[in-house]
Amino acid sequence: MPNVDHQAGLVHEALLYTSEEALADQVLPFIQEGIDAHEPVLVVAGPRCRKILRSELGSLVERLAGLLPAEDRWTKGSEVLQGYALELSALRRPGKPLRLVGEPVWTGWPEGREWLRYEAVVNHCFASWPYYSLCLYDRQAVPVDVIEDVARTHPLVSWDGRKSVSDRYLEPDRFLRAAEPTWERSPDSAPALRVTSFRQARAFVSHHGVRLGLGRNPEALMLASHELVANVVQHTGDTPVVSVWAQGDSLVCEVRDDGRGLDDPYAGYIPPRPEQERGRGLWMARCLADDLAVRSSKDGTTVRLYFRCAHDRRSGSWTARTSSP
Amino acid sequence: MRPGDHACYAFLTAADFRRMVADYFSEGAALGQQLLFMRGRGAPDDMVTDFGDAGLDAVIDLEARAQLLIVDPPAVDSMHGLSAALQDGLRMMTRQADASGFTGLRVAADATWGLAVAGDVSDVLTHELSMDRVVSETSATVVCGFHRPECTTGSIRLLEAIHPLEVGSDGDRTRFHLVMDGGDQVAVTGEVDLADEREFREALRALTAVVACPMLNLGALEFIDVRGLRVLADVARTLGERDRRLVLRHPSQLVRTCLSSTGLDRTPGLVID
């Protein structure tokens, strides 16, 4: 049974609405309850939802901890998670639970599927927080396959005002594994390098990144792959093998080691805390790359970075989306 | 080398150092500069002959003119006192060279013994960074020599990292440079990664002993990894605890992104300009 008491820990519910009236009917009582209980209530939503809630709430808007726009807020799934962690931390008061109404406006975007993984991670990393997260999904606008993933990442789902336990819910580590990019065999022709110095590895990756269409901006790729190489060297003492190839419209950079393997399915998915000694490298790599996948066993770990190459109309050159300013 | 340059030379043998200094002094002599050699402690008295043997006598009349001065290091045994004496000495000698009609002052020093006086390389770094300000201010040209066999590899790497220039490095140098750039401004250039993490931390720590609120110019930094950023944050936090701060100027978009996505941008004492 999923948790339904947000005093005791995270309650994570997806609210699938079909009309503006249905949305207002369900969200307003949730907000009202929170305000009555003096719980901080934060709303982060797209323009349409904000408009509806603003007009329905009337003067109650003033009592919200915030009514913030979601549409220009984030460029990455990792930023969503980190952003909420920061905003909610700032609102946390001893003995007071929190309420969030969040509208993931990015679900229809091409990168939205990757971002959904962070909805799964929420279940893990906020598990012990006294926090109710009500996530709004417009059933008319959100693609069917995304609705399926919403049911797999939210323990509670409300359909047409009826709240129920999601029977399709997957434990977050299983969801993460299932949602990773398909693992295709690396081409035999892919150039590979056994790393002997960090500098040499960066030069290798940068050279092939540019050659394979990443344009003149291979810095993000260089840094992300460096962080993976640095992790291997620091934590296993092993010398990793780096290789780079093109796959569809993406560039894949792989870092492989023969170490003991990476046990933590959430490695690199949790925002680092300021005082944390280590564990920033993989998070950083996830933030920089468009996607990242891990395969690990007792014989070693392979991490792949995916950078989409996109045509930049202004300069006429191919550049990585994430490295444009 | 040009006025205001401050270089480090880790030499293998005394003869190597004399040859290098003879060339360096010949160049200065041709420019009408006064030449000052500060010998190491316990060095032989008569080094004029040595410089003559190394070829300097072909350029100037070593005996006849006061163009070449050979001096002993100050007899001070605390690093703090020694550093102050050397900074004052450089200021005074520059003024004297100017008053005597020379076009500037060119200095070479065997500074190996300084490491022994300091006991700790970080004190020498602090001294060298302070010295760097005086060099810029006086427009002298200075080469600090260190006898490589008497120094640890770590010390040499650090000394090279904080000197704006180095002569005859053996290639095992840090990939970053940290150089005083006038006032509180400090330029960090090159590449910072975990291979040089320890040295980067040491150099910054020495810097905070010289400058209260350093402004690090990262505009020409080619690469910095998350461990390097962590070092910056640690140094900033320590400064912040004493109501001081570390300012990062002109960080690249990528550096900004990394600082914010790792949360290091919220470190107390760290200012991102």
Image (spheres, rainbow, N blue to C red):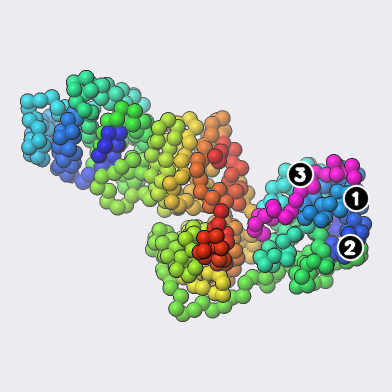
Nearest the viewer among A92 and A67 is A67
Residue B109: image x %, image y %? 23, 34
Q: Amino acid at mark 2?
A: Ser
Question: Which residue is at a point 57% across and 78% down the rendered structure image?
Answer: A184
Q: Find the distance from the CA under tag 1 to the CA under tag 3.
A: 26 Å
Mark 2 and mark 3 lie on one chain; the one further toward the N terminus is: 2
Mark 1 and mark 3 lie on one chain; the one further toward the N terminus is: 1
Report the magenta residues as a range: A58-80
**Residue B59 occupies quadrant:** top left
**What residue is shown with label 1?**
A56
Residue B23: image x %, image y %? 16, 40
**Secondary element at image label 2:** loop
Within 10 Å of disc 3 (Cα), the crowding (few <14, some 14-19, many 20+) is: some
Question: Do marks 1 and 3 share a chain?
Answer: yes
Q: Which mark is residue A96?
A: none
Circles 1, 3 touching at the beta carbon (< 8 Å): no
Question: Which residue is at a point 44% across and 35% down the rendered structure image?
Answer: B185
Within 10 Å of disc 1 (Cα), the crowding (few <14, some 14-19, many 20+) is: some
Question: Which residue is at a point 88% across and 49% down the rendered structure image?
Answer: A55
Circles 2, 3 touching at the beta carbon (< 8 Å): no
Residue A62, magenta (yes or no): yes
